[in-house]
Image: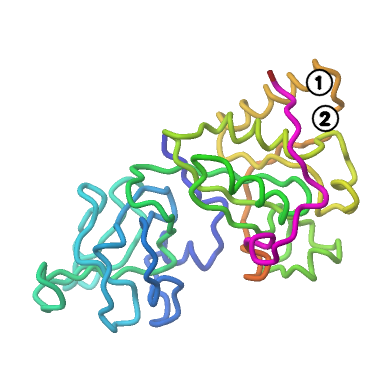
Amino acid sequence: MMILKTASLTDTVLSVVMDKGTEKPYSGDYDDFGESGTYLCRQCGKPLFRSNTKFHSGCGWPSFDAEINGSIAREVDADGMRTEIVCARCHAHLGHVFAGEGYTLKNTRHCVNSLSLDFVSDLNVNDTEEAIFAAGCFWGVEYFFKKLPGVLKTEVGYTGGHKQNPTYHDVCGDATGHYEAIRLVYDPTKVSYEKLATFFFEIHDPTQSNGQGPDLGEQYRSVVFYYDEAQKKTASILIEELEQMGYRVATTLRPVSTFWRAEDDHQDYYEKTGKQPYCHQYEKKFK
C-alpha cells in the first residue's frame, strides 16, 4: 500500500518533489554521504537506488550509475534538452539522468536532489511505509522504537503546530502548538502499522493528559498522527480496546501535518549520551 507523505513534507521539499525545483549544489545531506543502504523516494517511500550504485561525481548532487529496476521513469525535461527522472510510482521529481560522461563503466549518471530522497540502512528492502506518533519526550520514544524489528529509520521532530522551522527552545516555550514526535520508516513485510501502534500505546501512559511522566506541557501530550483512514481506524480500534479494559485514554487522533526534523543533538539522544529513558517504560497492555 502506498502512503503519500505530501502532508508531512516541508515547503522546501515540496518545492523540489512537486514543483520540480533544484536544491543548491553541495547543500544536500546525501551529496557527501557514503553509508550502506537504500535511497527511497521522499514522497512515497519507494526504494530507488542502492548505495553500491552511488559514486562521487563532484557535481554537487548525489550521483548514481543505476537505479533499482522499475523504480524510475524518464521524461523529456521542460527545457526540451535534458531527461528528467521521476519516481515511477508517485511521479515525484528526482533530478536528471545523463549518459556518455565516462564517470563509471555504466556510463550513466543519475543526478538527484537530496531533498527528493530518504535513506535507510537496509540494502534489501523492497518497499517502505511511514508512521508518526507523539508520546512525550521524543528521546525516550525513539529509544524504544529503535529496538523494534522492522523499523528501518527513526527521526525525532516537531509537528502539529503553527510555527515554521521551530527549534527545541521554541517548542519548550509552549507557544508553537507543536508536539515532540517521532517519524518512523518501516518495512511492512516485517512489522505492521497495527504492531507499531500497539507498541506506541505500550511504551507510554496514554491516560496522562497533561504530558508524560514528569514532563508536563502541551508538547508532551499523546497523539497518533495518521496518514490515511486505515491508520486512523487501526488506532481507533486499539483505543476502544484499551477503554474496554478500563483505561481512560487521553490520546488524540490527528491528521498528519508538516514534520520538522529536530536538531541533530536530539537524534539518537540516549545512544549518544549512554543515558536511560526516565519517563518511558514498556508495559504490555494488549493480549
Is 176 in front, or is 287?
Answer: 287
Q: Which residue appears at 42% of the width and 49% of the height? A: 45
Left or right of 226 on screen, residue 41: left
Query: What type is the residue that disc 2 sits on?
Result: Val
- The residue tagged 2 is 249
- The chosen color scheme is rainbow
Is 145 in front, or is 129?
Answer: 145
Residue 179, given in percent of the width and then of the height, sits at 75, 53
Q: Which residue appears at 64% of the width and 51% of the height? A: 182
Left or right of 174 on screen, residue 259: left
Q: Counting residues from the N terminus, which is met first, the one under dot 1 or under dot 2?
A: 1
Marking on residue 229: none
Left or right of 52 on screen, residue 81: left
Is 129 in front, or is 139?
Answer: 139
Q: Is residue 180 above or below residue 30?
A: above
Q: CA distance from mark 1 to mark 2?
A: 7 Å
Residue 192, given in percent of the width and then of the height, sits at 51, 31
- The residue tagged 1 is 243
Query: What type is the residue that disc 1 sits on?
Result: Glu
Q: Is residue 130 above or below residue 191?
A: below
Q: Which residue appears at 70% of the width and 66% of the height? A: 273
Q: Pointers 1 and 2 in contact (CB under 8 A)?
A: yes
Q: Is residue 274 magenta?
A: yes
Q: Is residue 1 above or below residue 26?
A: above
Q: From which residue to which does the magenta span run?
A: 268-286
